[in-house]
Image (cartoon, helix red, strand yellow):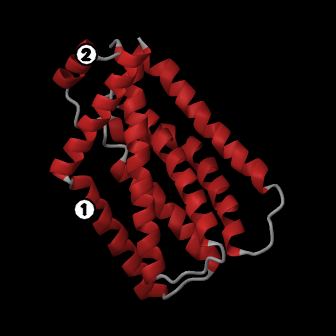
Amino acid sequence: MQSNSYRHIITLIKKDLLLEIRQQYTFYGVLLYVASTIFVVYLTMGEPEETVWNALFWVIQLFVCVNAVAKSFLQDSKGRMLYYYSIAGARDYILSKLIFNALLMMSMTLLSLFVFTMLLGNPLINIFQFIGISLLGALGLSFIFTFLAAIAAKAQQQAALMAIMGFPIIIPQLLLLGKIAKSAFSSVVQAGLWQMVLLLVGLDLLIILLAIILFPFLWKD
């Protein structure tokens, strides 16, 4: 049973990967958004100070996640969902979406960080620490918006529903990420850093658990 579940998850991830390679809408759309936004910031304020740099990075990651991850359920029509229902379970389907969107968001985050450092300078003292925090933040953002997109896909007003549900969830996540990321701009160890990192990991695990528990009820509709 577990081997079948594993094969279903891998097959669904390969399916999403092939669709992304063939269409490439997400990659070029996010690349255009990131490059144009950062270039406008560079023209208006040059290389910002580290606090502004940090805030801009996470705000842009939020919109990157909305464009890259939140649309993952929109391409699955009712016919496709019925087909997936016949070959895989709800748990396998949502896990495949969580894993694929996490990988997609992490790659987009690394791309954004590269463009950021090229155009807005590199105020980071510990860049590898910031890369690790960025990847952890990408995981959290992708998990949240994948879960919200799964819920909103069953409603007609998808964009409005995602905004209403996502605002009270994503704001604390972004504030926590911004506070953790400040440690990469200083050589002094920030007090309570590991506690905040563990809290962030706990929130990510909670989102995964909620998605696994609640999505089967949406799957039946």
**Answer yes or no: do the residues labelled 2 and 1 have beta carbons within 8 Å?**
no
Question: Residue drawn 59% across and 71% down?
Answer: 127
Question: Residue drawn 22% across and 37% down?
Answer: 75
Q: Residue at label 2?
A: 87
Looking at this view, name the residue that lies furthest to the front.
Answer: 3
Residue 126, by quadrant, is: bottom right
Q: Dot 1: few (<14), some (14–19), or many (≥20) neighbours within 10 Å?
A: few
Residue 221's x, y, as percent?
32, 13
Residue 181's x, y, as percent?
65, 63
> With 73 as the anchor, is 65 left or right in this view?
right
Q: Residue at label 1?
A: 28
| N-term-proximal mark, 2 vs 1 | 1
Separation (CA) of disc 2 from disc 1 = 32 Å
Amino acid beneath label 1: Tyr
Q: Is residue 207 depicted above or below 78 in this figure? A: below
Q: SS of the residue at dot 2?
A: helix
Residue 64's x, y, as percent?
40, 57
Question: Residue drawn 21% across and 54% down?
Answer: 25
Residue 210 in view of the camera: yes
Q: Is residue 38 depicted above or below 140 in this figure? A: below
Residue 151 in view of the camera: no
Amino acid beneath label 2: Ile
Residue 217's x, y, as percent?
43, 14
Callout in the foreground (2, 1): 2
Number of residue marks:
2
